[in-house]
Amino acid sequence: MSAGALDFDRIDITDVTRQYGRRRALSRVTLSASAGDVIVLLGPNGAGKSTLLNILSSLLRPTSGAVRYGDTAAADAGDALRGRIGFLGHELFLYSDLTARENLTFAARLYRLPDPDGIVERGLVRANLADRADDRVGGFSRGMRQRLALERALLHQPRLVLLDEPFTGLDDRSADALVERIAELGRHGSIVFAATHDFDYAARIATRATVVNRGRCCELPMDGSPLLTRYRTALAVEAA
Amino acid sequence: MISVLRSAWLIAAKDLRVEARSRELVYTTVFFAVTAVLIFAFSFVQEDSTVPPGAASGILWVTLTFSGTIALTRTFEREREHDTLRGLLLSPVERPAVYLGKLFAVLLLLAGVEAVLVPLTGLFFQAPLGRAPGLLCLLLATGTLGFASVGTLFAAMLVRARSRDVLLPVVLFPIVVPVIIAGVRGTNALFTPETDLAVVRMWLAMLVSFDAVFLSLALWTCGPLLGE
Amino acid sequence: MTRAVPVVLLIAAAMLAASPFMIDAAPPEVTMGLVQKIFYVHLPSAMIFMVSSVMCGVASAIYLMGGRSAKADRIALAAAELAIVFGLITLVTGPLWGRKAWGVWWVWDARLTSTLVMWLLYWSFVLLRRFGGAGSETLSAGVGLFGMALVPFVYWSVNVWRTLHPMTSVVPTLPASMGIPLWWDVVAFACLFGALFALRTRVERLRTDLDSALADADE
């Protein structure tokens, strides 16, 4: 199957539930996104944000409900679908004993990209690590690793970008660069989901915002008022 | 098919490069195997330095099983750091390629252990390694493949499980019993003074069919088994 | 189906209560004498052990290949647990007989070794389930499936050692006076197995339903 055949402009999550024994991580979530959307997922720890991202990544099966990527259901999409998804997890998927360049080259080959060397060079420049390219990742700071992991996740120009706490460990300059990068992804028609606790950055990247609380999703209105206020109102409404 | 093998090799080569840098697995596994052989020597070799019949082949295979389990646990512990196994599973690479890549890496590591272990048993327990070196190598190769083909799959699945260190042998040992029996009996038939090569070939045939069945089964099921 | 459980359990209990009298009435075997009576318990439990291990393997395969049906998972789990129970009966009664027949409690014979290995395998299924944490359903299904593929290999590999175990081919040639109590016990054990199996799958279903209900109540 060619990668183009799997390109999708929208994602539909319908009535998705994920249960772990007695705990329900997601409860009947329904959510749609289309090309260009940058959706921030807000919510307390353990609310189900990571579970939602994992289900979107197609690695975790919902207990019930369905996820569709364009016209293809997740269940019968096959291996090629994962080639259209980029994931930056809390763990960064980097090998400490390999250098920055080796890590990116390995990823580029895994994704079977044409011209891996050129792509890797551009990625290193974007991560602002060109001068440290041949140092082992084990010696990098959290912020440097985070920048490298972001490039690793975006190397194959995914249609769906899933970011779990992408601002962790970044200094102001890198965080500003990441905000710009996410905006650019949206402009190029990617669908971005970003789970974060940082309301300042969330407000800067979001075109839509969703609160995930106790396994349920609730979309916030985009009325121009401060995001934190809308978030607190939503939580208060739900508690009542 | 070609792309599966190429990706498998890519993953195995990555493992080899990481290992070449740290050499942690080779050093610790080989050292473990040597100390295990010593413990067996203390428990089996008689006061007058005679080795009981059958001890050499038994010691060889038991040590291989134990150090193989350690090698499997450590190999996948490395992929658990920074969740890199999930990174592999998130890529568009087919599941069988991930499985085969890890299998290649484990097999190469175990071949290195055997390169030390086998001469050592010859030296310590007067095992006649030179009697039919080709058959001995075949027994070792098919036995190791049988052990590693099942072990790699279950070790990969256990990466996300709790108490994985103890659960791997719990799951693996009952399944590889036929491999151990065939390996020990075949090697023993080779080492005894009245060597019967027909018996050796019979056990070898059993190992080959075990490898064929369990490798195909692993390749067939690794999609659903590694998927979630 | 669950309504039939008490009835089947009663039948099993009644049949098992009657079976000592039937076994007593059967003629003593010439060479083994009284110890041969163990065979009336040993063989039925071994048969049920085999049935439950096949059930576990098939259910595991269906679970893995057919979209993770919760029902297949429950069947595999119940079958694995019952394989442990009936395997234990087989493994305890066998040596009791073997002590008299062979002079030792245990011989490394094909049947004995393969039964022991398979029994351990169902232990690893259950241990995995108990201690594996989230996602252990898939893992244990892998064990069930590989275990089913393992049977011929275990049997082949241990069969090359001399087989001491009596052949099952003697069963059809038994005189009716011995055959009737034997098949009586086979039916009794099958009823017991059926009832326990239905109960165990039901408990497992109720457990997942309860988990769901508790999760609902949390919300």
Image: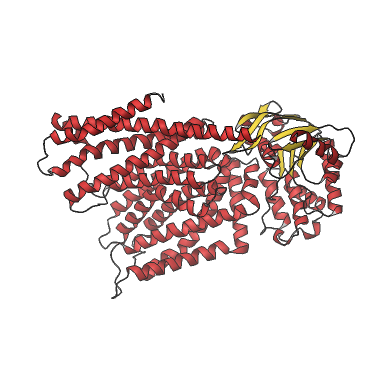
Give the quarter of the figure containing the N terminus of chain C: top left
Residue at the location (66% across, 53% down)?
B82
* Marker count (numbered): 0
Question: In screen coordinates, is A237 left or right of B117?
Answer: right
Determine which quarter of the picture holds residue A2: top right
Pick out the residue farthest to the left: C30
Give the quarter of the figure containing the C terminus of chain C: top right
Q: Is residue B66 above or below residue B1?
A: below
Q: Looking at the image, can residue C173 be seen?
A: yes
Question: In screen coordinates, is A143 left or right of A180?
Answer: left
Residue at the location (28% across, 44% down)?
C111
Where residue C134 appears, as percent x and y from the top left, is: 56, 43
Picture colour scheme: secondary structure
Residue at the location (32% across, 70% down)?
B45
Determine which quarter of the picture holds residue C214: top right
Where residue A188 appears, as percent x and y from the top left, is: 83, 36
Q: Nearer the viewer, residue C172 or B96?
A: C172
Q: Is residue B55 above or below residue C68?
A: below
Q: Is residue C41 above or below residue A28?
A: below
Where residue B48 appears, as percent x and y from the top left, is: 28, 76
